[in-house]
Every structure is written in structure tokens, then in C-alpha cells.
Amino acid sequence: MMAEESTEPKKYPPTEKKLRDLRQKGQFPKTELAEPTLELIVFTIIIIFTLYYLFEYSGEWFSAVLYADITVGLFTGIDVLWWCVGGLALLKLVMAVFEWVMINKAVISTESLGLKMDKINPVNGTKNIFGVEAISRSFRKVLELLFLLFLLKYVADVLGSQLYLLNEINNYPYFIYYLIYSIGAASVFYLVYGLCVGTVDFMAEKYHFLHKNRMTFTEMKNELKETEGSPEIKSERKRQMREFAETPITKGRQPTFALANPTHILVPVCYDPKIERRPVVLKICTESLALEERKRLEAMGIPIIEHIPLARAMYSKMKEGEDFLPKEFFNDVALIISYLKRLKNEKKKASS
């Protein structure tokens, strides 16, 4: 008994998870012209080089066959034939693996091996024959055929009369050149056909694929539940995020320098690009606490910059500190950090 199909409308585009699952099953948009176009490129290159090599050394081969023993020539011909057949078979195997990796995404689909009731469902069969996707595919096939006929007529008009004159050419090098040129030109025409029609066909297949695999609201909600995990996992994740949000940004940070008023206000500033590219103002101290903190920082070797206007402005803006540096102080703090780096480099050079 077949499962009852949901009547909920599918109006949401497929999510990344669904597309990934479909890709693992071997379902993804692709065009039928990708493989023959790729094989044509390789075939054209092989034929051109083979013809060139064949005609370039044909005189030496015929001379060797004529002056050699018949048995030797026969075995040599058989060896050459076996090498050609083996090379073509190996090339075909390499091309098959390459197409499987590049075009089929290295996916082995086993779904087509089983019996599916949907395939023998008359309703689905009617949709596959008279549906929008089937009509679109048939229309594209007609356009592809018309475009191919146009290219064939163009090739016949451009190269037909000249190809007919090949048997009248007595110039041996020119014959080889023009034969290779004709094969290459015809292949280029078909390559243009494959690229143009294949691109349009792929775009249409991708549109129908995304439209066919749209999701309902219930499917998206269920997938979101599976993605987020169980309630216990979500609760643990929320707890970790809450702890991270409640942790002060000044925890574990050491001041890079401190601004002084000079005795009433002390504004320690931390700048560590490995942790945060934006400077952080640590706890601002005033009055007696400012004097005690200044002595402690001087004992630690932290530079103290006496800048009364900047220290007062930062204190009036932030009061307690323990937050990221406001944007209006970026330029002043950047100049101080640059000045301290320059002093540090000069000390290193002097000591060395």
C-alpha cells in the first residue's frame, strides 16, 4: 500500500542539507551534452596528432615493410594494431573515470536498481509525459536539433566545396595540413554547439531540479529539528552561549599601555590582534586607585602615556571602562600604538 501523499504546498526552495543528500544519491542537475562534448575535444586532439604522426612517418614505415620479411612486417603490423586498440581502450577508461569524477561528482547511485512503485504509477506517468518538465525537455530537444542542422549546413557551405577538392590535391604537405584543418574546424563548430546548447540545457535542468525538489513548511521544520539536535543538546548549547556572553571581555587581558591624567585618572588599554583586532579598554581607575594601579603597571613595565585631554575624554565617555574602544578614539590610540612599536624596534636595534 502506497503512502498517502501530502497535500501541503511545496513552495520553499530546497535547503543545503537536502541538496547534499540528493547529491549523495546521485541526483543533481546536469546536461546530456557534457560527456559527448568532452569526448569530442579529446577525440579531435588524438585524431589530429595521429594523422600528423601517420603521414609524417608513413614513408619510413612503408620502406621498412617493403624491405623486411613478410612475417616480420605482419607481426609488426599486429603489434601496432594491438598497441592502438589498447591505447584507445585505456584512454576510454581514463575518460570514463574523469567524467565520473567531474560530471557525476564521483557518486555511485544504487536507487535505480530497485523497484519503485512511483515509476509504475499512472498519475506520475502522465505527469512525466505531459508535465511542464517533459514539455520543456521536448522543446529544448527540437531547438537543439534545429541549431545542429544550422551548424551542419554552415559547415557544408563553408567546407563542403573545399573538402570535395581533397582528392584533387597533389601537394602532399598541403593535403595533410588541409585535412587536419578540416577536422579541427568541424570539431570547433560542434564544440560551439555543445557549449552553447549545453549551457542553456544545464540552466533549464537546474531550474526544473530545484522546482521539483521544493519543500513544504513541515519538511523544513522537521529538518531544522534534525539539524539543531535534541532538546538536551540545544539546552547545553544555550548554556554555553550564555556563559560566553556573561564572561567579561577584559578577562585574561593585560594592558598594552595606559593613559594617565596624570594622577586622577588611569585608562589601561589592551591591544592584541591575535585575540581581537579592536582595542579593549580595561577597568578605568580614579583618584587613589589610579595612583596604586599606575605604580603596579610601572613595576610590570607597562608604558604610561600622560595625555590629559584624551584620558578625560575616554573617562567621560566610558566611566567604568571594560568595553571595546569607541570609534572616535581609534585614530589617537592607533598613533600611540604605532609610537610604542617604533620605540620597541629602536630598542631592539640598539641592543643588537
Image (cartoon, grey):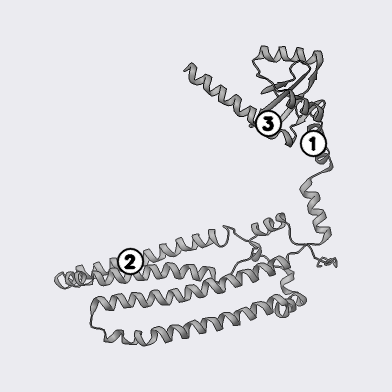
Q: Within 10 angstroms of label 2, few (less than 14), some, or many (20 or more) residues?
A: few
Q: Earlier in the sequence, mark 2 or mark 1?
A: 2
Q: Amino acid at mark 1?
A: Met
Q: Which mark is residue 97?
A: none
253 displayed left or right of 351? right
Question: Which residue is tagged 2?
Answer: 82
Number of disc labels: 3
Separation of residues labelled 3 and 1 (CA atoms): 34 Å
> Where on the picture, by quarter, is residue 328?
top right
Q: Secondary structure at mark 2?
A: helix
Foreground of the two, 153 or 297: 297
Vertical arrangement, residue 199 with respect to residue 259, above or below: below
Circles 3 and 1 in contact, beta carbons < 8 Å = no
Separation of residues labelled 2 and 1 (CA atoms): 69 Å
Question: Which residue is tagged 1?
Answer: 241
Question: Which residue is tagged 3?
Answer: 332
Vertical arrangement, residue 187 with respect to residue 15, above or below: below
Q: Earlier in the sequence, mark 3 or mark 1?
A: 1
Q: Within 10 angstroms of label 1, few (less than 14), some, or many (20 or more) residues?
A: few
Residue at (82% x, 34% y) in the render: 242
65 displayed left or right of 105? left
> Where on the picture, by quarter, is residue 156?
bottom left
Residue at (33% x, 77% y) in the render: 179
